[in-house]
């Protein structure tokens, strides 16, 4: 079978090409991709030489229809509508046996280590297929992977009901996490960012409070909000040294802090800033990917419920939906024309 694909041939160069695709294994399925979202983690692979190899076919946030199944596939059938859980853990190591699939070191990953959804037909393991409920659209299906990144720390924290949730960073995942926290019963949801337009959108999507972290008066207003000075669940998603320092400055005593954003610069803390971790007795934990037992985990079940109940607005998060040639042009333009929202590739076979 011939697949149309968009390859990153070399650093900063995308091309549309054809490739032959077949089932990779007896427990694989062939899927026809509908929508494929661009993730921030794709950017270093496109523009900074950060891919494992070139040429590479990226894409791990997607929805698709199953068109062929391997002989050992049991729970997926042709014409099923699916979203993809792109991690392929080994299922044999100690951490996998404990259900900590996100921490597997013997994994592969669809869209970074093996071909992804910037190909209109691809072979993926049955275990990566998450059936979409009837009420969930294919476009919503392309947002399961990013929303589960935000649900993962919420689940590790034992939920967010009656907690004061603080989201640092109003990118796509931050805004999805904000909406999930509201839907899951957070007492308040506060969003920090440096972009006033993103903060306005956060307010529209249900944030109780929004603050610009570059504005001193905003920080003062936040610190004077006594109503949210306890039961804090802080989720850092900006992935910058200044955002981490902000967390330490705004956190109330014994706040729960989850670090989701990936740093691309060295972090250096003065001893007075570091001391805040001790003096406030902060609980700081990393959060990596979005999986739990039984694979792919409760994160994905909750995502299905939220989308089925129309509790998540994705339309406000999308910059545009592009067919292949215009998608390539838009990606090439990113260094001088940054994305204002989620960029979506739509394969025209649907």
Image (cartoon, grey):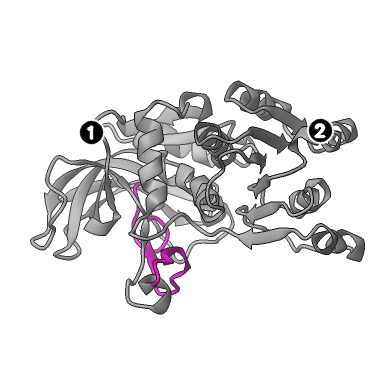
Label 1 sits on residue:
349
State the quadrant of the C terminus. top left
- Is residue 90 left or right of 155 when viewed as pictured? left
Horizontal and vertical percent for residue 214? 83, 37
- Is residue 34 left or right of 171 when viewed as pictured? left
Q: Dot 1 surroundings within 10 Å: few (below 14), some, or many (20 or more)?
A: few
Q: Is residue 96 visible?
A: yes
Horizontal and vertical percent for residue 23? 17, 59
Please give the range of residues in magenta. 98-117
State the CA–CA distance, disc 1 to disc 2: 52 Å
Magenta highlight: main SS: loop
Which residue is painted at 64% across and 48% down in the image?
235
Which residue is painted at 47% across and 44% down in the image?
146
Q: Secondary structure at mark 2?
A: loop
Name the one closer to the observer, 108 or 52: 108
Horizontal and vertical percent for residue 225? 81, 33
Depth-wise, is mark 1 or mark 2 nearer the camera? 2
**Magenta span includes 114:** yes
Label 2 sits on residue:
225
Which residue is painted at 74% across and 43% down in the image?
230
**Magenta span includes 166:** no
């Amino acid at each position: 079978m011939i697949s149309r694909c968009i390859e990153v041939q070399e650093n900063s160069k995308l091309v549309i090409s054809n490739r032959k695709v077949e089932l990779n294994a007896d427990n694989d399925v062939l899927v026809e991709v509908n929508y494929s979202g661009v993730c921030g983690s794709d950017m270093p692979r496109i523009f900074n030489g950060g891919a494992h190899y070139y040429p590479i076919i990226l894409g791990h946030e997607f929805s698709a229809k199953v068109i062929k199944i391997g002989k050992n596939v049991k729970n997926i059938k042709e014409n099923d509508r699916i979203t993809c859980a792109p991690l392929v853990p080994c299922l044999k190591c100690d951490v996998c046996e404990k259900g900590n699939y996100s921490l597997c070191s013997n994994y592969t990953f669809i869209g970074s280590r093996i071909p992804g959804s910037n190909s209109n037909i691809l072979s993926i393991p049955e275990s990566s297929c998450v059936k979409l409920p009837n009420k969930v659209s294919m476009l919503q299906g392309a947002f399961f992977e990013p929303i589960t990144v935000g649900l993962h720390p919420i689940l590790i924290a034992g939920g967010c009901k009656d907690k004061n949730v603080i989201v640092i960073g109003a990118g796509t995942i931050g805004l999805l996490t904000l909406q999930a926290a509201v839907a899951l019963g957070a007492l308040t949801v506060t969003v920090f960012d440096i972009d006033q337009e993103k903060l306005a959108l956060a307010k529209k999507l249900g944030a109780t409070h929004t603050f610009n972290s570059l504005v001193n008066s905003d920080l003062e207003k936040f610190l004077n909000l006594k109503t949210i000075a306890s039961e804090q669940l802080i989720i850092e998603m900006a992935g910058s040294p200044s955002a981490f320092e902000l967390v330490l400055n705004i956190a109330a005593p014994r706040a729960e802090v989850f670090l989701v954003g990936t740093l691309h610069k060295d972090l250096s803390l003065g001893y007075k800033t570091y001391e805040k971790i001790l003096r406030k007795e902060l609980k700081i934990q990393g959060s990596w990917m979005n999986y739990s037992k039984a694979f792919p985990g409760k994160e994905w079940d909750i995502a299905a419920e939220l989308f089925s109940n129309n509790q998540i607005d994705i339309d406000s998060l999308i910059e545009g939906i592009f067919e292949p040639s215009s998608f390539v042009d838009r990606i090439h333009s990113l260094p001088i024309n940054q994305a204002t929202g989620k960029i979506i590739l739509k394969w025209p076979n649907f």
